[in-house]
Amino acid sequence: MIKNDLILRTLAGLATERPPVWMMRQAGRYLPEYRRLREKYSFFERVQTPALAAEITLQPVDQLGVDAAILFSDILVVLQAMGLEVQLIENTGPVLPEPVRSEADAKRIFVPDVEDALSYVFDAIRLTKQELNGRIPLIGFAGSPWTLLCYMVDGKGSKTFDLTKSFCYTQPALAHRILQMLTDTTINYLLQQVKAGADVVQLFDSWGGLLGPEDFEVFSLQYMRQIIEALKGESPTILFAKGAWHSLAEMAATGVSCIGVDWCIRPQMAREMAGSPVVLQGNFDPARLLTPKADLKKQVIRMLNAFGPGRHIANLGHGILPNVPVDHAKLFVDTVKNHVYQNSYEKSSL
């Protein structure tokens, strides 16, 4: 029994007294406690040690009072499980020393037994659920097949991922074969997260916005659709495809519980494009958390009013920045928690 089930009721389309609130990357670099652990342990030590991952997951829960915890992990653990080396270099980002760019390269990857290869993730979920003790729900997550392919092919972060796009356009059969492998792995991975205790799962398509509408369908959405379909009846799902606002209607048509949006689209437009039944999540600009507190509070209220009552999970439009003061992050959360919907909504059902 979860004491604060606000986000679960919102995802189920039920009327609530206020929007739930959490922040992407809320367990991470802006917290002094996290930075102390970073000095002692490497990134993947933190990810692959269940006790550390659980501790980091709980840090913002205890300090900020968010309505949901999100597991401390990384989307690239899936690529590690599929046979690739992934290095995470502080202040640089992920590096894959041997990217996949040919048929010969593709022979090095495989669909793994996720229950074995990623057992540390499921152990971290079980431990976190035990520590949460029913206070709030726990969100699990994975990267979208397209986003994972970007790192697999480019071998590092990029503003454009031109190598991956070229790979898809010049070797489409191989690209689609790998995308299907990534999809099959991700389905198994998320189902195991739910089995371990995750209450909600979010799919991060961090680089979906680099694709135009047609390519987004071909190389990203058709694979995310499979994942969402596989999770129906198992867990509520949130789909966040940064910058892919052009396909909000198509994303909503997948039957996903919620769609995350960034700050580059007006809430009213997102509502019109996605349709009224779907829950929206977002879309505060993370950099806005750096503004003076009085202005910050006004901006949060403005966002909440723009989304209107109901069918909204308050969040950032992307991950929290490492230089955000903790008290500013807490003000964001507290402002949302003090926001009350009008009685006309509270008494209605969606």
Image (cartoon, helix red, strand yellow):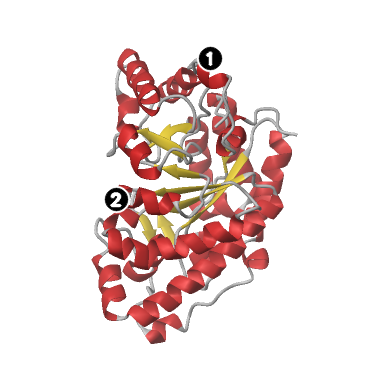
Is the residue marked by circle 1 packed among few (<14), some (14-19), or many (20+) residues within 10 Å?
A: few
Of the image marks 2 and 1, the number of the one nearer the N terminus? 2
Kind of residue at badge 1? Asn
Quadrant of the drawing holding the C terminus: top right
> Along the line of sight, which residue is nearer the eye, 11 or 140?
11
Question: Mark 2 — residue?
Answer: 246
SS under mark 2: helix
* Percent of width and height locating residue 66: 55, 28
Q: Where is residue 217 in the image (x, y as percent from the top left)?
A: 36, 63
State the SS at label 1. Answer: helix
**Which residue is drawn at the image coordinates 59% and 61% (left, top)?**
230
Tell me where residue 175 sits by quadrant: bottom left
Say left or right for 339 vs 175: right
Residue at 62%, 51% (x, y): give it.
49
In the rendered image, the quadrant that contains the N terminus is: top right
- Quarter of the image holding residue 281? top left
Number of residue marks = 2
Residue at x 64%, y 47% (from the top left corner): 198
* Residue 200 occupies quadrant: top right
Of the pair 335 and 19, the residue shown nearer to us: 19
What residue did someone put label 1 on? 343
> Is 26 located above or below residue 110 in the figure?
above
The percent coordinates of residue 166 (x first, y second) are 25, 73
User: Is residue 285 at all visible to an observer of this figure?
Assistant: no
Query: How far across and how far down the image is residue 85, in percent?
Result: 46, 69
Other residues around mark 2 within 10 Å, as few (<14) / some (14–19) / many (≥20): some
Mark 2–mark 1 Cα distance, whole angstroms, equals: 34 Å
Query: Marks 2 and 1: which is nearer the front?
Result: 1
